[in-house]
């Protein structure tokens, strides 16, 4: 099994993503509110690197919150889940489109 992590700012896509995953046969997922680095540092003034980070993050709305989707899938479902997600989100290599990655699950209790 793998646990897929999708970090996305376009929260209006979350319901469509979950529906697409269900249509692809994925039967479990959790959605959490998330807060990105831009928001975290926007109110800090006491670190020397903050001004450099503000320059790098210029144009990123620090008030914008996102969502973190956690999706447990069987190994054979990984590619179908990735396709279902990117069919909704589009190319995740576009800046600020989102981040998707998977990590192996070494054990899982309670997910059937």
Image (cartoon, rainbow, N blue to C red):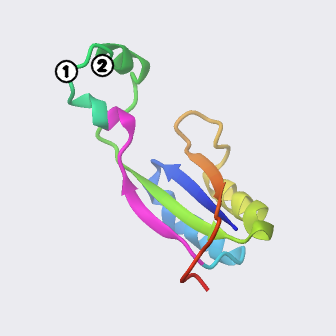
**Disc 1 marks which residue?**
45
- Residue, far front: 106
Q: Quadrant of residue 105?
A: bottom right
Position of residue 90 in the picture relative to residue 99 (left or right): right
Element assignment for label 2? helix
- Residue, far right: 76
CA gap between label 1 and label 2 equals 7 Å
60 over 5 or under it: above or below: above
Element assignment for label 1? loop
In magenta, the rendered stretch is 28-39
**Disc 2 marks which residue?**
50
Residue at 39 percent across and 21 percent down: it is 58
Residue at 58 percent across and 66 percent down: it is 71
Membership of 71 in magenta stretch: no
List x then y, in percent, for residue 109: 56, 80
> Which quarter of the rendering shows the N terminus?
bottom right
Residue at 71 percent across and 78 percent down: it is 25
| Tag 1 and tag 2, C-beta contact below 8 Å | yes
Instruction: Tell me which label, 1 or 2, sits earlier in the chain.
Output: 1
Position of residue 100 in the picture relative to residue 40 (left or right): right
Q: Nearer the viewer, residue 64 or 104?
A: 104
Residue at 39 percent across and 30 percent down: it is 60
């Amino acid at each position: 099994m793998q646990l897929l992590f999708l970090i996305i700012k376009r929260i209006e896509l979350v319901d469509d993503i979950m529906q697409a995953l269900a249509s692809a046969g994925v039967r479990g997922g959790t959605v959490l509110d998330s807060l990105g680095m831009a928001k975290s540092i926007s109110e800090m003034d006491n670190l020397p690197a903050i001004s450099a980070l503000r320059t790098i993050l210029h144009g990123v709305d620090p008030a914008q919150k996102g969502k973190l989707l956690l999706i447990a899938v069987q190994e054979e479902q990984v590619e179908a889940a990735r396709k279902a997600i990117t069919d909704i989100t589009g190319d995740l290599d576009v800046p600020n489109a989102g981040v998707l990655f998977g990590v192996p699950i070494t054990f899982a209790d309670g997910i059937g």
